Image (cartoon, rainbow, N blue to C red):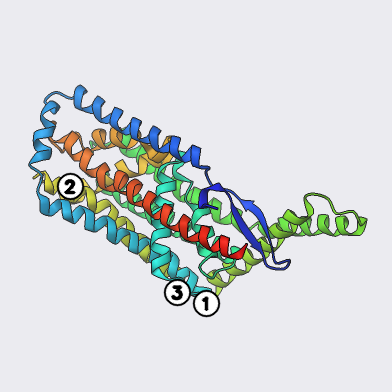
């Protein structure tokens, strides 16, 4: 059994397994990867052909500094460890220790699935499953991934707020782009707040589920949905208890998780600056960093696998005024090579390794 074929999750009370968590099937993942690569290369071709003077970008790419290319790779690898610590601290808040040798490959596999699915949402189920195999219950793993996701989104929103304020002072007064971007950031914060409020309302769903289960038991004729519903009820109960523990008595671990999310995005956005340094492009570092934040955030709202196509075009638009036309396609190639293609390649390897490990364990349990 492999992670993206649909996990069999433990029903602790009955000692059996119930399939209630699904992640992308292998065919959809493969198609997503192929589509993402096609859109990425297509957008790069369009950029190189549509901008005057951009045809010489291959020469700029050949002259890239090897040192800064190594820095790009080191930054991405360091970001994986920061992202792993984001979840590890939350697991520690629940009294569980998840080994880094498990959680780092899980993060890489999650990145692989995230970048091969629309709106970048495919990695969470794989992370939940992997954490549940690392000593956490399913409810605890769900709480860690959900709260870790909130920390990550809040950190990204903070970076976007800073970028909006920085760019507002460098755009023409009253520019509609600056106002639209700031408005988007406000909506982003509101969406995070709405999600947190919605997650807390699961307590209103549980009594209804419990009443339905009680009525089913009283009828003496269990229906097909009774067992999955019972598993879901226990999952919600465990999830609420774990979230309550972390938010009420383990706030220090939440703060550490948020700090790791900030470090992750700082490392991730610094890849673009290092790529520019490799191509010997210099300028206002703060402004360039702010435009990197814009270019990396836009693809999150585009329904293509990994934001492909939109990422390249948004980077071309955002940095078109700061990067020479002959260098811009080369920068996009390097930026996407480390933030996208490297995650796809190594994340796919991590997914294969974890799949093999879990398959062996499942075979041992059979």
The x and y percentages for residue 283 are: 12, 46
Q: CA distance from mark 1 to mark 2?
A: 40 Å
Q: Secondary structure at mark 2?
A: helix
Crowding around mark 1 (Cα neighbors within 10 Å: few <14, some 14 to 19, many 20+) is few
Q: CA distance from mark 2 to mark 3?
A: 35 Å
Q: Secondary structure at mark 3?
A: helix
Residue that carries the numbered disc 2 in the rendered image: 275
Question: In this image, 300 relative to 245: left or right?
Answer: left
Residue that carries the numbered disc 3 in the rendered image: 252
Q: Residue at x 43, y 39 (%)?
A: 301
Residue that carries the numbered disc 1 in the rendered image: 95
Q: Closer to the camera, 224 or 171? A: 224
Q: How many marks?
A: 3
Q: CA distance from mark 3 to mark 1?
A: 13 Å
- Residue 175 visible to the viewer: no
For marks 1 and 2, the one nearer the N-term is 1
Question: In this image, 181 relative to 240: left or right?
Answer: left
For marks 3 and 1, the one nearer the N-term is 1
Q: Quadrant of residue 222?
A: bottom right
Tag in front: 3 or 1: 1
For marks 2 and 3, the one nearer the N-term is 3
The x and y percentages for residue 7 are: 58, 54
Question: In this image, 321 relative to 338: left or right?
Answer: left
Q: Residue at x 29, y 53 (%)?
A: 268
Crowding around mark 2 (Cα neighbors within 10 Å: few <14, some 14 to 19, many 20+) is many
Q: Residue at x 47, y 50 (%)?
A: 123
Q: Secondary structure at mark 1?
A: loop
């Amino acid at each position: 059994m492999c992670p993206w074929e649909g996990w069999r999750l433990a029903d602790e009370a009955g000692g059996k397994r119930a399939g209630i968590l699904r992640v992308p099937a292998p065919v959809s993942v493969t198609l997503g990867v192929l589509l993402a690569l096609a859109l990425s290369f297509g957008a790069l071709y369009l950029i190189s052909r549509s901008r005057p003077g951009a045809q010489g970008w291959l020469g700029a790419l050949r002259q890239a500094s090897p040192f800064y290319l190594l820095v790009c790779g080191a930054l991405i690898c360091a970001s994986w460890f920061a992202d792993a610590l984001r979840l590890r601290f939350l697991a520690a808040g629940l009294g569980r220790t998840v080994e880094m040798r498990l959680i780092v490959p899980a993060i890489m596999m999650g990145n692989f699935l995230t970048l091969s699915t629309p709106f970048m949402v495919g990695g969470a189920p794989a992370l939940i499953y992997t954490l549940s195999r690392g000593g956490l219950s399913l409810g605890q793993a769900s709480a860690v991934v959900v709260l870790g996701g909130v920390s990550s989104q809040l950190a990204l929103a903070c970076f976007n707020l800073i970028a909006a304020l920085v760019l507002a002072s460098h755009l023409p007064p009253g520019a509609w782009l600056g106002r639209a971007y700031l408005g988007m950031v406000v909506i982003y914060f509101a969406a995070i707040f709405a999600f947190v409020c919605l997650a807390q309302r699961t307590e209103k769903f549980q009594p209804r589920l419990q009443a339905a289960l009680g009525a089913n038991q009283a009828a003496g004729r269990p229906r097909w949905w009774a067992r999955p519903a019972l598993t879901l009820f226990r999952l919600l109960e465990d999830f609420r208890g774990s979230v309550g523990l972390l938010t009420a008595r383990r706030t220090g671990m939440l703060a550490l998780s948020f700090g790791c999310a900030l470090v992750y995005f700082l490392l991730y956005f610094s890849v673009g600056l290092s790529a520019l340094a490799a191509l010997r492009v210099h300028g206002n570092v703060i402004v360039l960093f702010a435009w990197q934040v814009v270019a990396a955030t836009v693809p999150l709202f585009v329904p293509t696998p990994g934001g492909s196509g939109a990422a390249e075009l948004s980077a071309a638009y955002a940095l078109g005024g700061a990067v020479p036309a002959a260098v811009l396609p080369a920068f996009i190639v390097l930026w996407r090579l480390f933030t996208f293609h490297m995650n796809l390649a190594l994340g796919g390897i991590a997914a294969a390794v974890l799949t093999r490990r879990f398959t062996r364990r499942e075979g041992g349990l059979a």
